[in-house]
Image: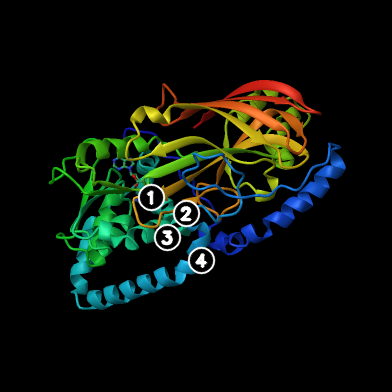
Amino acid sequence: MKDEPPAKRRQIISKTAIGDQDDASTVLETETSSIEHQQQRSSSSISCPSSSSPTITKESMEGKVNPAPHGDNDNLPTTNVIADKTNDITKNLTKQTTTATIFNNSSTDSKKETKIEEEAEVDRTSKDYYFDSYAHHAIHEEMLKDEVRTRTYEMAIKHNAHLFRNKIVLDVGAGTGILSMFASQAGAKHVYAVDCSSIAEQARQIVQKNGFGPDKITVIQGKIEEIELPVLEVDVIVSEWMGYFLLYESMLDTVIYARDKWLVKDGTGVVFPDKAVMYICAVEDGQIKKDRIDFWNNVYGFDMTPIQKIALQEPVVDIVDSKAVVSDAVPILHLDILTCRKEDVEFAADFELTANRNDYIHGLVAYFECAFTQVHKPIGFSTSPFCRYTHWKQTIFYLPENLVICDKEKITGHITCKPNRKNRRDLDIGISILVDGEHSKSSFSVDYRLR
Ligand code: SAH
């Protein structure tokens, strides 16, 4: 990736995922009361026809059926909620492995190990990190500390060991090698761990240190699109390719390339994960919008609105409080990773949102869910504001007008998304909105660019 700009998919954040999750696990229990509270607050500020309280429920991953509002994880095969219950099991698994590894390592020649480390030491400058942001450990630290993400992969792989036993596995974008090691623990015959970044150098040492010899995992540094594999076919592809707004960074292209080139063609091939769905909903976010957008109206007495337009066109990746969500969430994109084509990242969808209280709408929020469904009991995770924190957070599209919406009123819209022509890793996202409500009658379009 040395010829490409740095990946901004994973921003380095000060707040760690693990720290957040203690609080996040209570979100689902408190959300109903928050909504009621919010409703009371909103009702006093805007007068609209009265209606009943919203019931927030979460649709299944398939999401093809009538798009239901979000909130209750009953039907969704996500681990954001069940991870708590399974954490003990997975922690125990990890603990046992770690103990075994330490024991194994203690019997190896420590001098030899030090030598390997010295040889592998590379003098990296900030310029190198600029051109290869995945080389820096911090980006991997953030991903690994995202327990919702990492534990879901771990569970999906280890609870479905029958799909891995004696199989050839390809890890597309292996990073530190974490998914390759899970796959090997699940009994894979051999794992090819491919990454174009120089993190592959550390991955090579990591797999070796953890007892996965050259007969188990082979780390290959190179672009998937350019490397040769020592095998013609693989049985399983594992990859964590998702970016902000699911598609930012366009790494899905790479997974599709690998699938078409190497995944066994007899219909038994497995892709982990194999489903992704993106959703959109409306939010009341006055305070932040004021801070980020209205700010430019008056900066130390100067009118800086030329920047305001640019600021508005840039979607914001941040944590959205579930209490700020004022509508149901509806799917705008379904991807089947087993069959989708490169062109599918270019999509257009109509949507209709239904307000679930009287409030303002300052923006639309997109988030995604991913699932492993080629298994007995599908599991996945959600990046919804109603679920536990993930490092993908949510993507907010601020609107040029603040809308006033009444409970049960509809917001109709259209969204288009395509890679930017000049920089394919950026996304051009167009959103059109039409509201014909009691207080707001408006229609407008905004061209956003996620860069
Ligand atoms: N699998 C790891 C890392 C995921 S991040 C984990 O789950 O923690 C995605 C990784 O894909 C990055 O390390 C990046 O360097 C790599 N990558 C992106 N595009 C690639 C390509 N075309 N070929 C090989 N690796 C790629």
Q: Measured from the top left, where is residue 177 in percent x and y?
A: 30, 55
Which residue occupies 41% across, 71% down? 89
The residue nearer to you, when weighing 273 against 4, is 273
Q: Callout 4: helix, strand or loop?
A: helix
Quadrant housing residue 298: top right
Q: Measured from the top left, where is residue 270 in percent x and y?
A: 28, 48
The residue nearer to you, when weighing 103 against 112, is 103
Q: Measured from the top left, where is residue 328 in percent x and y?
A: 64, 41
Which residue occupies 19% across, 74% down? 108
Which of pointers 1 and 3 indicates the residue nearer the eye? 1
Quarter in which the N terminus is drawn: top left
Mark 4 or mark 3: name the one nearer the start of the chain: 4
Q: In this rendering, would 316 be left or right of 348?
A: right
Estimate the spatial distance between the alpha carbons at disc 4 and disc 3, rounded to whole Å: 10 Å
Would residue 349 be visible to someone looking at this image?
A: yes
Query: Which mark identifies residue 84?
Result: 4
How packed mark 3 is, by other alpha carbons closer than 10 Å (few <14, some 14-19, many 20 or more), is many
Q: Callout 1: helix, strand or loop?
A: loop
The amino acid beneath tag 2 is Pro
Where does label 2 land, which residue? Answer: 77
Where does label 1 land, which residue? Answer: 373
Which of pointers 3 and 2 indicates the residue nearer the eye? 2
Where does label 3 land, which residue? Answer: 151
Query: Which mark identifies residue 16?
Result: none
The residue nearer to you, when weighing 84 against 48, is 48
How packed mark 4 is, by other alpha carbons closer than 10 Å (few <14, some 14-19, many 20 or more), is some
The amino acid beneath tag 3 is Arg
The amino acid beneath tag 1 is Thr
Mark 1 or mark 3: name the one nearer the start of the chain: 3
Mark 2 or mark 1: name the one nearer the start of the chain: 2
The amino acid beneath tag 4 is Asp
Mark 4 CB lies closer than 8 A to ligand 1: no
